Image (cartoon, rainbow, N blue to C red):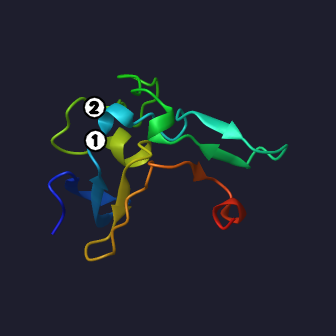
């Protein structure tokens, strides 16, 4: 069903039964608000998050918290930080297609940059 390299946790998210899924690369998880990025123009929304290969390991505590939860160490289940702040995780409804974020290359914020 899911590769053993992924962590899958059944959760209730805003009252809905869902699944949190990530790639278990916590050492590369900076958090949505903290992942290093470069700006590409004067538009503050025009940026690219750096690829894993451009970065070292992420801090054990990036300084962001969700519902009192911080970034976990060697998790066996997702906490609130994982679900709301981790850029490597997604939340899907049961049976929904799964496509985890790919940080092997830069991730552009604007769709127009993705298409070029």
Residue labelled with disc 1: 79
| Residue 6 % position (x, y) | 22, 53
Seen at 69% across and 65% down, the residue is 116
| Residue 36 seen in the figure | yes
Rendering quarter of residue 4: bottom left
Residue labelled with disc 2: 72
Seen at 36% across and 60% down, the residue is 91
Between label 1 and label 2, give the one nearer the viewer. 2
Seen at 73% across and 49% down, the residue is 45
| Residue 100 image label | none
| Of the pair 76 and 57, the residue shown nearer to us | 57
Rendering quarter of residue 18: bottom left
* 1 and 2 marks in contact (CB < 8 Å): yes
Q: Quadrant location of the N terminus?
A: bottom left
Label 2 residue SS? loop
**Of pointers 1 and 2, the one earlier in the residue sequence:** 2
| Residue 105 % position (x, y) | 51, 49
In the rendered structure, the answer to whether residue 37 lies left or right of residue 112 reads left
| Residue 99 % position (x, y) | 37, 65
| In the depicted structure, whether residue 33 falls above or below residue 99 | above
| Of the pair 112 and 73, the residue shown nearer to us | 112
Neighbor class of circle 1 (other Cα within 10 Å; few <14, some 14-19, many 20+) is some
């Amino acid at each position: 069903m899911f590769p053993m390299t992924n962590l899958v946790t059944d959760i209730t998210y805003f009252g809905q039964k869902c699944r949190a899924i990530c790639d278990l690369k916590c050492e590369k998880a900076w958090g949505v608000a903290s992942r290093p990025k470069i700006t590409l123009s004067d538009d503050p929304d025009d940026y690219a998050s750096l690829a894993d290969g451009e970065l070292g390991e992420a801090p054990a505590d990036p300084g962001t918290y969700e519902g009192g939860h911080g970034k976990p160490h060697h998790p066996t289940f997702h906490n609130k930080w994982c679900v709301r702040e981790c850029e490597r995780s997604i939340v899907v409804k049961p049976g929904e297609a799964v496509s985890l974020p790919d940080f092997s290359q830069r991730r552009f914020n604007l769709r127009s940059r993705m298409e070029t």
